[in-house]
Amino acid sequence: MNATVPPPDAAMSAPAPPSPRRWRRLLLLPPLLLGVALLTWQIRADRAPDAPVASERRVAVEVVEVEPRALTPRAVGYGTVAPARTWRATAEVPGRIVERHERLERGRLLPAGTLLAQIERSDFELAAARARAEIRRLEAQIEQLEVRRENLQRSLEIQQRAVRLAEADLERQRQLFERGNTSEATVDQAETELLIRREQLQNVRSSLAEIAPEIDVREADLEVRRAELGDTELDLERTEIYLPFDARVAEVAVEQGEYVSPGTVVARFDSVERAEVDAQFALSQLRPLIPDDLELGRLDIRSLAELPRRLGFDAKVRLSERDLDVVWEARFERPSDRIDAQTRTFGLIVAVDDPYSMARPGDRPPLTKGMFVEVVLEGRPLADRLVVPLEAVRRRDRGAALYLADADDRLEIRPVILGPVIDEHAVIADGLDGGERVVVSDLQPAVAGMALDITVREPPPEPTALSEARP
């Protein structure tokens, strides 16, 4: 056999293939070399890695810069319009309605002096005629008595003269009798004549004395008849019912031909010269409108009557409904007579003159009975008041507080004393200075000293309504 055997050196010199484990070790070498190189570079550069720095977070808020400003206190109340005067046309005499005004209908406007209704007059005209006839009869009787008194006065003068003559004749006869020139019978006759004259004089005086009482009786009867005639003529006037002022018909209760008795309501009317609103206000609303320098003293009738003038309120009545917004100038007339037991509100009565004068059909309605309206009262302007949005007022256990941004834009929590609340704004009575910045944003939580990222809001407009703040 000639087999060929390779030499041992040649077999041992051929390379063996690498194993898989070795390949994995070779893959770890580059990252290790890279890390060593970086570490060497940092050591050589003498640089340590930067440590993370903690930064303070700022909370974004809105603030308003508060400056002193003039403020007009206002109060808003609500009430129902009513006429200042109402009148019931009432029958004062009995009778049948023989005439009624053709425009006597509910809702009609009628001028003063309109003849509304006519009651039958015939019975009163007959009574007046009888009274006039009786007056003429009594006047004639009095005239007769006056003539008789004049005649008796003349008779009295004659009888007085006759008595004087009889007294002189008796004295003469007595002197003659004493001298013996006449008889005693003549003296007796003269004395008898004197007595007769004196009796006649007395009769005239008695008749004359009776005249005066008779005349007094007739004159008394005459006054009674004249009074009866006056009543009858007054009843005749009352048969015509006239409207005393410009008014609107509110109700009609009778028809022509109906019989009415005294006290029967013929119609009801509302005046159009002035309207009134008894508006209800919270007592706290009215307090800021009272001037600080107002001294009422003792509340008597005179001071209460002068109260509207001394308060100096400006008033407006406003009707706002859908696309309708109408305003009437008004004036504060007087306080109401009571406080509403349910709402605890107080009534103030304002008046609007000529509520129909500015009416325009389809554009501006008249201020009529039954409208529910808003009443705005304005007091005297208040100077140098600090006003903040109501949302900036924070409620605390011990009252109210404000969040302020200090000079370093950090939060300060400060207690304050509130004045009145005006619409969506509050007046600060104490605890705040002009120029300070008040936080209006809601902070949850609010920690004193926290950093703020501030945005300045525009200052609020002037308030339009007023009520009392409640810390």
Image (cartoon, grey):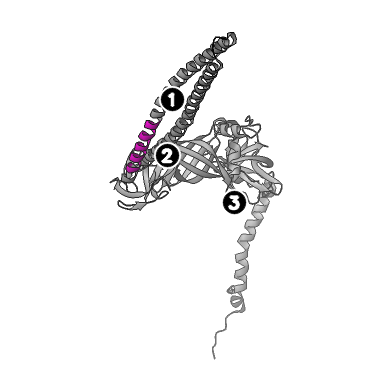
Q: Earlier in the sequence, mark 2 or mark 1?
A: 1
Side of 459 relative to 229 (left or right): right
- Is residue 133 magenta-colored? yes
Q: Is residue 461 visible?
A: no
- From mark 3 to mark 1, how far is it between C-alphas? 77 Å
Say which amino acid is labelled 3.
Ala
Q: Secondary structure at mark 2?
A: strand
User: Which numbered disc flags the more N-terminal residue, 2 or 3?
Assistant: 2
Closer to the camera in the image, 352 or 301:
301
Q: Nearer the viewer, residue 245 or 49?
A: 245
Q: In the rendered picture of this protein, how many numbered marks are placed on residues?
A: 3
Give the quadrant of residue 363.
Answer: top left
User: Toward which corner of the image does residue 301 lie, by quadrant?
Assistant: top right
- Report the amino acid beneath label 1: Arg
State which mark lies toward you, 2 or 3: 3
Which residue is pictured at 47% across the width and 21% down the height? Answer: 156
Mark 1 surroundings within 10 Å by alpha-carbon count, few (fewer than 14), some (14 through 19), many (20 or more): some
Looking at the image, is 349 positioned above or below residue 193? below
Q: Are marks 3 and 1 in contact (CB under 8 Å)?
A: no
Mark earlier in primary sequence (3, 1): 1
The relative height of residue 325 versus residue 143 in the rendered view (above or below) is below
Report the side of 416 relative to 17 (left or right): right
Q: Which mark is residue 149?
A: 1
Local secondary structure at mark 1 = helix
Disc 2/disc 3 C-alpha distance (Å): 30 Å
Using a 10 Å C-alpha cutoff, classify the residue at mark 3 as few (fewer than 14 neighbours), some (14 to 19) or many (20 or more). few
- The residue that mark 3 highlights is 341
**Range covered by the magenta-colored residues:** 125-141
Q: Residues within 10 Å of mark 2 (few under 14, many from 20)?
A: some
In this view, the mark in front (3 or 1): 1
